[in-house]
Image (tube, rainbow, N blue to C red):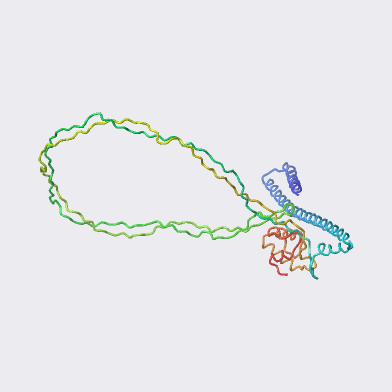
Amino acid sequence: MKNGKLLIAAIAISVLVASGCSTRKDVSSTADLQQQLEMREVEIKDLQSSMGKMEADLDEKDAQIQAKLVAAEEAKRMANDAEARARAAEQSGSTPSSAAASVAGTELLPPNAKAGECYARVFLPPTYSTKTERVLEREASERIEVIPAKHQIVEETVETKAASERAEIVPAEYKWVEEKVLVKEASSRMEAVAAEYKWVEEKILVKQAHTTWKEGRGPVEKVDNATGEIMCLVEVPAQYETVKKKTLVKPATTRQVDIPAEYKTVKRRVMTKAPTVRTIAIPAEYTTVKVDKQVSPPQERRIEIPAEYKTVPRTEKLTDGEIAWREVLCETNMTRTTVTDIQRALQRAGHNPGPIDGVYGTRTNAAVRSFQRANSIPTGGLTIKTIEKLGVDL
Protein backbone atom coordinates (compact mmCIF):
# COMPACT_ATOMS: atom_id res chain seq x y z
CA MET A 1 0.00 0.00 0.00
CA LYS A 2 2.78 2.44 0.96
CA ASN A 3 4.76 1.50 -2.18
CA GLY A 4 1.71 2.27 -4.31
CA LYS A 5 1.35 5.75 -2.74
CA LEU A 6 5.03 6.47 -3.26
CA LEU A 7 4.77 5.37 -6.91
CA ILE A 8 1.82 7.71 -7.51
CA ALA A 9 3.68 10.64 -5.90
CA ALA A 10 6.81 9.92 -7.97
CA ILE A 11 4.80 9.84 -11.22
CA ALA A 12 3.13 13.17 -10.38
CA ILE A 13 6.43 14.88 -9.56
CA SER A 14 8.11 13.55 -12.71
CA VAL A 15 5.22 14.86 -14.85
CA LEU A 16 5.54 18.32 -13.29
CA VAL A 17 9.34 18.40 -13.73
CA ALA A 18 9.09 17.29 -17.36
CA SER A 19 6.43 19.85 -18.16
CA GLY A 20 8.42 22.55 -16.37
CA CYS A 21 11.61 21.73 -18.35
CA SER A 22 9.79 21.89 -21.66
CA THR A 23 8.19 25.28 -20.95
CA ARG A 24 11.14 26.97 -19.25
CA LYS A 25 12.82 27.56 -22.62
CA ASP A 26 9.80 29.44 -23.96
CA VAL A 27 9.52 31.90 -21.05
CA SER A 28 10.54 35.29 -22.26
CA SER A 29 9.17 37.72 -19.69
CA THR A 30 8.12 38.04 -16.06
CA ALA A 31 4.42 37.98 -16.95
CA ASP A 32 4.81 34.73 -18.87
CA LEU A 33 6.76 33.23 -15.97
CA GLN A 34 4.02 34.23 -13.52
CA GLN A 35 1.37 32.71 -15.77
CA GLN A 36 3.36 29.48 -16.07
CA LEU A 37 3.72 29.29 -12.28
CA GLU A 38 -0.02 29.76 -11.77
CA MET A 39 -0.72 27.02 -14.30
CA ARG A 40 1.70 24.69 -12.50
CA GLU A 41 0.03 25.43 -9.16
CA VAL A 42 -3.37 24.53 -10.61
CA GLU A 43 -1.91 21.30 -12.03
CA ILE A 44 -0.32 20.48 -8.65
CA LYS A 45 -3.64 21.02 -6.85
CA ASP A 46 -5.45 18.81 -9.38
CA LEU A 47 -2.81 16.09 -8.96
CA GLN A 48 -3.02 16.35 -5.17
CA SER A 49 -6.80 16.02 -5.32
CA SER A 50 -6.49 13.00 -7.63
CA MET A 51 -3.85 11.46 -5.38
CA GLY A 52 -6.10 11.95 -2.33
CA LYS A 53 -8.98 10.17 -4.06
CA MET A 54 -6.68 7.36 -5.21
CA GLU A 55 -5.27 6.95 -1.69
CA ALA A 56 -8.80 6.78 -0.25
CA ASP A 57 -9.75 4.13 -2.85
CA LEU A 58 -6.57 2.17 -2.11
CA ASP A 59 -7.24 2.32 1.64
CA GLU A 60 -10.79 1.12 1.10
CA LYS A 61 -9.65 -1.76 -1.12
CA ASP A 62 -6.98 -2.69 1.40
CA ALA A 63 -9.60 -2.77 4.17
CA GLN A 64 -11.88 -4.95 2.04
CA ILE A 65 -9.01 -7.35 1.28
CA GLN A 66 -8.10 -7.61 4.97
CA ALA A 67 -11.73 -8.24 5.92
CA LYS A 68 -12.04 -10.93 3.23
CA LEU A 69 -8.83 -12.60 4.42
CA VAL A 70 -10.08 -12.66 8.01
CA ALA A 71 -13.47 -13.99 6.87
CA ALA A 72 -11.76 -16.68 4.76
CA GLU A 73 -9.62 -17.78 7.70
CA GLU A 74 -12.67 -17.89 9.94
CA ALA A 75 -14.63 -19.88 7.35
CA LYS A 76 -11.73 -22.32 7.02
CA ARG A 77 -11.59 -22.74 10.78
CA MET A 78 -15.34 -23.31 10.95
CA ALA A 79 -15.12 -25.86 8.14
CA ASN A 80 -12.38 -27.72 10.03
CA ASP A 81 -14.49 -27.64 13.19
CA ALA A 82 -17.50 -28.92 11.28
CA GLU A 83 -15.44 -31.75 9.79
CA ALA A 84 -14.09 -32.68 13.22
CA ARG A 85 -17.57 -32.71 14.72
CA ALA A 86 -18.87 -34.76 11.84
CA ARG A 87 -16.18 -37.37 12.47
CA ALA A 88 -16.96 -37.36 16.16
CA ALA A 89 -20.66 -37.79 15.41
CA GLU A 90 -19.89 -40.66 13.00
CA GLN A 91 -17.84 -42.43 15.67
CA SER A 92 -20.61 -41.97 18.23
CA GLY A 93 -23.20 -43.50 15.91
CA SER A 94 -24.96 -40.46 14.40
CA THR A 95 -24.84 -39.59 10.69
CA PRO A 96 -22.32 -37.01 9.39
CA SER A 97 -25.06 -35.05 7.68
CA SER A 98 -26.89 -34.41 10.96
CA ALA A 99 -23.65 -33.26 12.66
CA ALA A 100 -22.78 -30.96 9.77
CA ALA A 101 -26.30 -29.55 9.78
CA SER A 102 -26.00 -28.90 13.51
CA VAL A 103 -22.69 -27.05 13.01
CA ALA A 104 -24.08 -25.06 10.09
CA GLY A 105 -27.13 -24.16 12.10
CA THR A 106 -25.15 -22.86 15.11
CA GLU A 107 -22.04 -21.25 13.54
CA LEU A 108 -22.35 -20.84 9.78
CA LEU A 109 -25.64 -18.89 10.09
CA PRO A 110 -26.69 -16.11 12.49
CA PRO A 111 -28.35 -17.50 15.67
CA ASN A 112 -31.85 -16.44 16.74
CA ALA A 113 -32.42 -14.40 13.56
CA LYS A 114 -35.83 -12.83 12.89
CA ALA A 115 -37.56 -12.04 9.64
CA GLY A 116 -36.49 -8.69 8.18
CA GLU A 117 -33.11 -8.64 9.98
CA CYS A 118 -29.75 -8.63 8.20
CA TYR A 119 -26.50 -9.96 9.65
CA ALA A 120 -22.86 -9.77 8.61
CA ARG A 121 -19.63 -11.27 9.86
CA VAL A 122 -17.64 -8.54 11.63
CA PHE A 123 -14.24 -8.61 13.23
CA LEU A 124 -14.27 -8.27 17.02
CA PRO A 125 -10.86 -6.81 17.98
CA PRO A 126 -8.88 -8.43 20.81
CA THR A 127 -9.09 -6.91 24.27
CA TYR A 128 -6.08 -6.12 26.43
CA SER A 129 -5.37 -5.17 30.04
CA THR A 130 -2.32 -3.40 31.41
CA LYS A 131 -0.92 -4.61 34.72
CA THR A 132 2.11 -3.59 36.73
CA GLU A 133 4.65 -6.13 37.93
CA ARG A 134 7.23 -5.57 40.68
CA VAL A 135 10.64 -6.80 39.48
CA LEU A 136 13.80 -7.17 41.56
CA GLU A 137 16.41 -4.76 40.18
CA ARG A 138 19.19 -5.24 42.74
CA GLU A 139 19.46 -7.86 45.50
CA ALA A 140 19.97 -6.98 49.15
CA SER A 141 23.60 -6.65 50.24
CA GLU A 142 25.76 -5.08 52.92
CA ARG A 143 28.80 -2.85 53.11
CA ILE A 144 31.47 -2.62 55.80
CA GLU A 145 32.62 0.67 57.26
CA VAL A 146 35.75 0.94 59.39
CA ILE A 147 35.41 3.43 62.23
CA PRO A 148 38.90 4.69 63.09
CA ALA A 149 40.12 4.94 66.65
CA LYS A 150 39.30 8.14 68.50
CA HIS A 151 42.09 10.18 70.11
CA GLN A 152 41.96 13.10 72.48
CA ILE A 153 44.63 15.68 73.32
CA VAL A 154 44.87 15.93 77.11
CA GLU A 155 46.59 18.95 78.66
CA GLU A 156 48.56 18.49 81.88
CA THR A 157 49.45 21.56 83.96
CA VAL A 158 52.95 22.00 85.49
CA GLU A 159 53.79 24.81 88.01
CA THR A 160 56.69 27.05 86.92
CA LYS A 161 56.47 29.92 89.52
CA ALA A 162 55.08 29.88 93.08
CA ALA A 163 52.34 32.23 94.27
CA SER A 164 53.28 35.50 96.14
CA GLU A 165 51.87 38.87 97.36
CA ARG A 166 52.59 42.57 96.84
CA ALA A 167 51.38 45.83 98.42
CA GLU A 168 49.75 48.48 96.30
CA ILE A 169 48.55 52.01 97.06
CA VAL A 170 45.05 52.58 95.87
CA PRO A 171 44.65 56.26 94.95
CA ALA A 172 41.62 58.30 95.78
CA GLU A 173 38.60 58.00 93.50
CA TYR A 174 36.81 60.96 92.02
CA LYS A 175 33.78 61.41 89.88
CA TRP A 176 32.29 64.15 87.80
CA VAL A 177 28.89 65.33 88.90
CA GLU A 178 26.69 66.74 86.17
CA GLU A 179 24.10 69.42 86.73
CA LYS A 180 21.51 70.30 84.09
CA VAL A 181 20.60 73.87 83.23
CA LEU A 182 17.45 74.64 81.16
CA VAL A 183 18.36 76.27 77.85
CA LYS A 184 15.12 75.94 75.85
CA GLU A 185 11.64 75.05 77.04
CA ALA A 186 9.66 72.12 75.60
CA SER A 187 7.42 72.78 72.54
CA SER A 188 5.57 70.92 69.74
CA ARG A 189 5.23 70.98 65.95
CA MET A 190 2.86 69.55 63.30
CA GLU A 191 4.26 66.98 60.85
CA ALA A 192 2.64 65.64 57.64
CA VAL A 193 2.24 61.85 57.33
CA ALA A 194 2.23 60.62 53.71
CA ALA A 195 -0.49 58.30 52.41
CA GLU A 196 0.22 54.56 52.20
CA TYR A 197 -0.43 52.48 49.04
CA LYS A 198 -0.06 48.86 48.05
CA TRP A 199 -0.01 46.96 44.74
CA VAL A 200 -2.79 44.38 44.31
CA GLU A 201 -2.64 41.68 41.63
CA GLU A 202 -5.95 40.85 39.93
CA LYS A 203 -6.62 38.01 37.45
CA ILE A 204 -8.62 38.91 34.33
CA LEU A 205 -10.12 36.20 32.11
CA VAL A 206 -8.58 36.50 28.62
CA LYS A 207 -9.89 33.35 26.96
CA GLN A 208 -12.49 30.94 28.31
CA ALA A 209 -11.87 27.21 28.59
CA HIS A 210 -12.95 25.29 25.50
CA THR A 211 -12.50 21.97 23.73
CA THR A 212 -10.93 21.23 20.35
CA TRP A 213 -10.30 18.23 18.11
CA LYS A 214 -6.74 16.95 17.68
CA GLU A 215 -5.29 13.94 15.93
CA GLY A 216 -4.35 11.08 18.25
CA ARG A 217 -3.85 7.36 18.61
CA GLY A 218 -6.19 4.83 20.09
CA PRO A 219 -5.21 2.56 23.01
CA VAL A 220 -5.87 -0.59 20.94
CA GLU A 221 -4.62 -1.07 17.36
CA LYS A 222 -4.32 -3.96 14.95
CA VAL A 223 -1.94 -3.82 11.97
CA ASP A 224 -4.18 -5.72 9.55
CA ASN A 225 -7.19 -3.53 10.18
CA ALA A 226 -8.16 -0.76 7.79
CA THR A 227 -6.40 2.52 8.50
CA GLY A 228 -8.21 5.75 9.26
CA GLU A 229 -7.87 9.07 11.01
CA ILE A 230 -8.57 9.17 14.79
CA MET A 231 -9.67 12.48 16.35
CA CYS A 232 -9.49 13.16 20.09
CA LEU A 233 -11.53 15.86 21.85
CA VAL A 234 -8.99 17.78 23.98
CA GLU A 235 -9.95 20.27 26.71
CA VAL A 236 -8.04 23.57 26.51
CA PRO A 237 -7.92 25.39 29.89
CA ALA A 238 -8.96 29.00 30.33
CA GLN A 239 -6.32 31.73 29.98
CA TYR A 240 -5.92 34.53 32.50
CA GLU A 241 -3.84 37.70 32.61
CA THR A 242 -2.54 39.18 35.87
CA VAL A 243 -2.96 42.98 36.20
CA LYS A 244 -1.31 45.03 38.97
CA LYS A 245 -3.40 47.83 40.55
CA LYS A 246 -2.25 50.45 43.07
CA THR A 247 -4.77 50.85 45.92
CA LEU A 248 -4.87 53.30 48.86
CA VAL A 249 -4.29 51.62 52.24
CA LYS A 250 -4.09 54.68 54.52
CA PRO A 251 -4.85 58.33 53.57
CA ALA A 252 -2.44 61.19 54.24
CA THR A 253 -2.71 62.76 57.74
CA THR A 254 -0.83 65.05 60.14
CA ARG A 255 0.59 64.32 63.56
CA GLN A 256 1.83 66.42 66.45
CA VAL A 257 5.50 65.93 67.36
CA ASP A 258 6.60 66.98 70.85
CA ILE A 259 9.95 68.81 71.00
CA PRO A 260 11.58 68.18 74.38
CA ALA A 261 13.20 70.92 76.42
CA GLU A 262 16.92 71.52 75.97
CA TYR A 263 19.34 71.52 78.88
CA LYS A 264 23.06 72.37 79.27
CA THR A 265 25.16 70.06 81.45
CA VAL A 266 27.70 71.52 83.89
CA LYS A 267 30.39 69.09 85.23
CA ARG A 268 31.95 69.19 88.74
CA ARG A 269 34.69 66.84 90.13
CA VAL A 270 33.93 65.26 93.53
CA MET A 271 36.05 62.68 95.55
CA THR A 272 34.07 59.58 96.28
CA LYS A 273 36.72 57.36 97.98
CA ALA A 274 39.88 58.24 99.95
CA PRO A 275 43.28 56.67 99.01
CA THR A 276 44.08 53.24 100.63
CA VAL A 277 46.70 50.42 100.64
CA ARG A 278 45.78 46.91 99.52
CA THR A 279 47.58 43.57 99.27
CA ILE A 280 47.50 41.92 95.87
CA ALA A 281 48.01 38.16 95.62
CA ILE A 282 50.25 37.09 92.73
CA PRO A 283 49.09 33.67 91.54
CA ALA A 284 51.40 30.83 90.70
CA GLU A 285 52.39 30.38 87.08
CA TYR A 286 51.87 27.10 85.23
CA THR A 287 52.69 25.65 81.83
CA THR A 288 50.61 23.05 79.93
CA VAL A 289 51.89 19.85 78.31
CA LYS A 290 49.72 18.25 75.58
CA VAL A 291 49.35 14.44 75.65
CA ASP A 292 47.65 12.40 72.84
CA LYS A 293 45.52 9.66 74.43
CA GLN A 294 43.33 7.01 72.71
CA VAL A 295 39.72 7.30 73.81
CA SER A 296 38.17 4.37 71.85
CA PRO A 297 39.73 1.59 69.68
CA PRO A 298 38.95 1.19 65.92
CA GLN A 299 35.63 -0.56 65.19
CA GLU A 300 33.87 -2.34 62.32
CA ARG A 301 30.28 -1.49 61.31
CA ARG A 302 28.15 -3.49 58.84
CA ILE A 303 25.45 -1.54 57.02
CA GLU A 304 22.63 -3.48 55.32
CA ILE A 305 21.64 -2.29 51.83
CA PRO A 306 18.01 -3.25 51.10
CA ALA A 307 16.95 -4.80 47.82
CA GLU A 308 15.74 -2.44 45.10
CA TYR A 309 12.64 -3.08 43.01
CA LYS A 310 11.09 -1.38 40.03
CA THR A 311 7.56 -1.48 38.64
CA VAL A 312 7.31 -2.68 35.04
CA PRO A 313 4.05 -2.31 33.04
CA ARG A 314 2.92 -5.51 31.30
CA THR A 315 0.14 -5.85 28.71
CA GLU A 316 -1.90 -9.05 28.72
CA LYS A 317 -4.36 -10.15 26.06
CA LEU A 318 -7.74 -10.96 27.60
CA THR A 319 -9.54 -12.17 24.49
CA ASP A 320 -8.40 -12.92 20.93
CA GLY A 321 -9.87 -11.21 17.92
CA GLU A 322 -12.67 -13.19 16.30
CA ILE A 323 -15.28 -13.11 13.56
CA ALA A 324 -18.89 -13.08 14.77
CA TRP A 325 -22.37 -12.46 13.42
CA ARG A 326 -23.77 -8.98 14.17
CA GLU A 327 -26.99 -7.36 12.99
CA VAL A 328 -26.27 -4.81 10.26
CA LEU A 329 -28.12 -2.33 8.11
CA CYS A 330 -28.06 -3.57 4.50
CA GLU A 331 -29.90 -2.81 1.28
CA THR A 332 -32.86 -4.92 2.46
CA ASN A 333 -33.65 -2.67 5.42
CA MET A 334 -31.82 0.55 4.40
CA THR A 335 -33.54 3.72 3.15
CA ARG A 336 -32.08 6.86 1.60
CA THR A 337 -33.21 8.88 4.62
CA THR A 338 -31.41 6.52 7.01
CA VAL A 339 -28.18 6.76 5.00
CA THR A 340 -28.44 10.57 4.99
CA ASP A 341 -28.85 10.60 8.79
CA ILE A 342 -25.82 8.29 9.14
CA GLN A 343 -23.70 10.52 6.87
CA ARG A 344 -24.61 13.61 8.89
CA ALA A 345 -23.83 11.82 12.18
CA LEU A 346 -20.44 10.71 10.82
CA GLN A 347 -19.67 14.28 9.73
CA ARG A 348 -20.57 15.61 13.21
CA ALA A 349 -18.28 12.98 14.77
CA GLY A 350 -15.33 14.17 12.66
CA HIS A 351 -15.31 11.36 10.07
CA ASN A 352 -15.76 12.64 6.50
CA PRO A 353 -18.37 10.52 4.67
CA GLY A 354 -18.12 12.50 1.43
CA PRO A 355 -21.18 14.26 -0.02
CA ILE A 356 -24.42 13.99 1.99
CA ASP A 357 -26.41 12.33 -0.80
CA GLY A 358 -28.10 9.35 0.90
CA VAL A 359 -25.92 6.87 -1.04
CA TYR A 360 -23.86 4.38 0.95
CA GLY A 361 -20.67 4.53 -1.16
CA THR A 362 -16.99 3.80 -0.59
CA ARG A 363 -16.28 7.07 1.23
CA THR A 364 -19.23 6.58 3.57
CA ASN A 365 -18.10 3.00 4.23
CA ALA A 366 -14.55 4.23 4.96
CA ALA A 367 -15.93 6.84 7.39
CA VAL A 368 -17.97 4.11 9.14
CA ARG A 369 -14.85 1.95 9.55
CA SER A 370 -12.91 4.94 10.89
CA PHE A 371 -15.68 5.66 13.41
CA GLN A 372 -15.77 1.99 14.47
CA ARG A 373 -12.01 1.88 15.05
CA ALA A 374 -12.10 5.17 16.97
CA ASN A 375 -14.84 3.85 19.29
CA SER A 376 -13.57 0.20 19.57
CA ILE A 377 -16.63 -1.14 17.75
CA PRO A 378 -16.42 -4.39 15.69
CA THR A 379 -15.55 -3.59 12.08
CA GLY A 380 -16.76 -5.24 8.89
CA GLY A 381 -20.19 -3.76 8.26
CA LEU A 382 -22.72 -1.11 9.28
CA THR A 383 -23.79 -2.82 12.52
CA ILE A 384 -26.78 -1.82 14.61
CA LYS A 385 -24.38 -1.03 17.48
CA THR A 386 -22.57 1.45 15.22
CA ILE A 387 -25.85 3.13 14.28
CA GLU A 388 -26.86 3.37 17.96
CA LYS A 389 -23.42 4.83 18.81
CA LEU A 390 -23.94 7.47 16.09
CA GLY A 391 -27.31 8.37 17.64
CA VAL A 392 -29.34 7.57 14.52
CA ASP A 393 -32.90 6.33 15.03
CA LEU A 394 -34.04 3.49 12.78
The x and y percentages for residue 170 are 13, 37
Q: Nearer the viewer, residue 275 or 18?
A: 275
Q: Quadrant of the C terminus?
A: bottom right
The x and y percentages for residue 25 are 73, 41
Q: Nearer the viewer, residue 315 or 309?
A: 309
The x and y percentages for residue 253 are 29, 60
Residue 218 visible (yes or no): no
Image quadrant of residue 364? Answer: bottom right
Query: Looking at the image, which residue sits at the far bottom?
Result: 115
Q: Nearer the viewer, residue 134 or 158?
A: 158
Task: Answer above or below: position of 276 versus 371.
Answer: above
Image point (86%, 60%), residue name: 86
Q: Is residue 295 left or right of residue 96?
A: left
Q: Is residue 292 left or right of residue 75?
A: left
Q: Is residue 239 left or right of residue 281?
A: right
Residue 21 visible (yes or no): yes
Query: Looking at the image, which residue sits at the far top?
Result: 160
Task: Answer above or below: position of 144 versus 388.
Answer: above
Q: Nearer the viewer, residue 231 or 133?
A: 133
Q: Is residue 315 left or right of residue 15?
A: left
Tally the numbered discs: 0
Task: Answer above or below: position of 12 versus 377.
Answer: above
